[in-house]
Image (spheres, grey):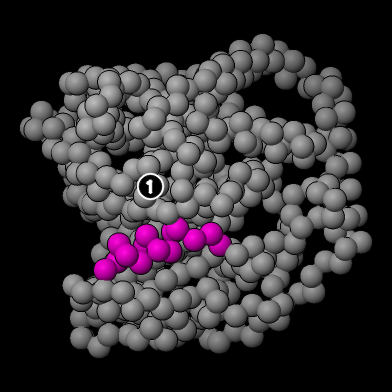
Amino acid sequence: MPTARLSALDASFLEIESPTAHMHVGWVATFLPPANGVRPTFEELRDHVASRLWRAPRYRQRLAPVPLGLAPPRWADDESFDVCNHILHSPARDLAEVADMAMSVPLCRERPLWELWIADELGDGRIGVVGKAHHCLVDGIAAVELASLMLDPEPDPPVPVPERWRPARPPGALDALGHGMRSLVRAELAVLGAPARLARSPRRLLDLPDQARRAASVLVDTVDPAAPTPVLNEPISPLRRLALFERPLEDLQRVKRRFGTTLNDVLLAVCAGGVRDLFGTRGQPAIPLKTMVPVNVRGDEAAGDLGNQISFIFVDLPCDEADPVRRLERVHRATTARKRAGQPAVAGAALRALGYTPPPVQHVAAHAAASPRAYNLVISNIPGPREPMYMRGCRMEAAHPVVPLSDGHSLSIGLTTIGARACFGLYADRRTLPDADLVAERVDLAVDELLGVAE
């Protein structure tokens, strides 16, 4: 696979990583043993995954920095790649123990940026898999798609033909330096060529006022500072806790149909209810929270692409509202207004524009965008496979997402839909938010509240 340079957005997730903020996207999945009763061993599961890596060549590539930091790193084949460094065995009987341990440790940047932990003998008889990949490699959608590479739509798929892989030679220092300088020149030429492109296309000139108005609206919404709250925005530790629960997807769909909203609106509203209760347990008044909501902008033609192809909207999460229906209505009005204003498209353009700025500007922008002054928490809705999926004959039962935490953020919430299940993952700093499981219970109760009104 040819080398490729990280985009400015991809590289931003490297920049904001710190000893306490590990920028990996993850998932925690459970599998039922095969119907024939013959459980695969860890070695068989490892070899099964290894045999599929040709489908995702980037999983055998590492970061190759550009000298002098002239441009973001490139991807290069790892000449010493060993799958045993990435697919690891856990003898733990408790899946939560595996997830908390794996997510509390950063990925090694000297290797391809992913790991799978397989717990093949859980106490309840199931098989657990905890996966993580650096956010510079994948966004939430791509992480689900990459996870699905080890899965099949039938229990007994054809055995893949063994593939002989030969890594390409990594770029030399002079080649990498030249690549970085060419990237800088291309960025400068793109900026200098903008007036000429506008002159060749008068229609673009006519569109500029509307584009400027929309861009200004998005920038105001983006830079309008959030109010950091001690409940969610204290300095964090490296230790993580993942609280999980699941519901029938139909529960959320019923609320959506009853009130004429979207599934994402229902997710935001129930999260507002759960976090509202957290304020109460801390003896603090509940306030609206500025919430970053990632939006997938990956088209069908790019469905299998890696890297980050996301934009975002900011929504005031109405934690101050006691009534569950009014919470949902406020969320729906806010998300509808932002979509009509074209916020995701304009925000996406702003993110792409970062690629034309010097690296120091990109670094400052990355830290500003990840600050608790920019938002209080992230809530993400990540669609998963709707049909049954199997890993070496073991049917996937559930898969819960892990949405990374940047510094100053104690909680993120993700939802993945797997078949007829809605799988929630509340990812928290273990020191500042030790009661993450209680928050998960309160979000679950918030679903019951809305469901009771919807019937």
Question: How many callouts does the rendering have?
Answer: 1
Label 1: which secondary element: loop
Closer-to-camera residue (274/192) = 274
Q: Which residues are magenta?
A: 94-107
> Where is residue 154 drawn, in percent x and y?
32, 74
Residue 174 belongs to magenta span: no
Q: Main secondary structure of the magenta part?
A: helix
Horizontally, residue 444 falls left or right of residue 30, namely: left
Residue at point 69% right, 15% down?
Answer: 208
Residue at point 86% right, 67% down?
Answer: 172
> Where is residue 267 drawn, in percent x and y?
30, 36
Quick check: 440 above or below 262?
below
Which quarter of the figure is the C terminus placed in?
Answer: top left
Which quarter of the figure is the N terminus placed in?
Answer: bottom right
> Which amino acid, mark 1?
Arg
Q: Residue 252 is drawn in which quadrant?
A: top left
Horizontally, residue 388 falls left or right of residue 294, namely: left
Density class for disc 1 (Cα within 10 Å; few <14, some 14-19, many ≥20) is: some
> Where is residue 32 drawn, in percent x and y?
24, 73
Closer-to-camera residue (392/198) = 392
Residue 102 belongs to magenta span: yes
Q: Is residue 417 visible?
A: no
Q: Is residue 87 visible?
A: yes
Per the image, the residue denoted by label 1 is: 431
Residue at point 44% right, 35% down?
Answer: 234
Residue at point 85% right, 59% down?
Answer: 176
Quick check: 329 above or below 88?
above
Q: Residue 195 is drawn in which quadrant?
A: top right
> Where is residue 80 drawn, in percent x and y?
68, 79
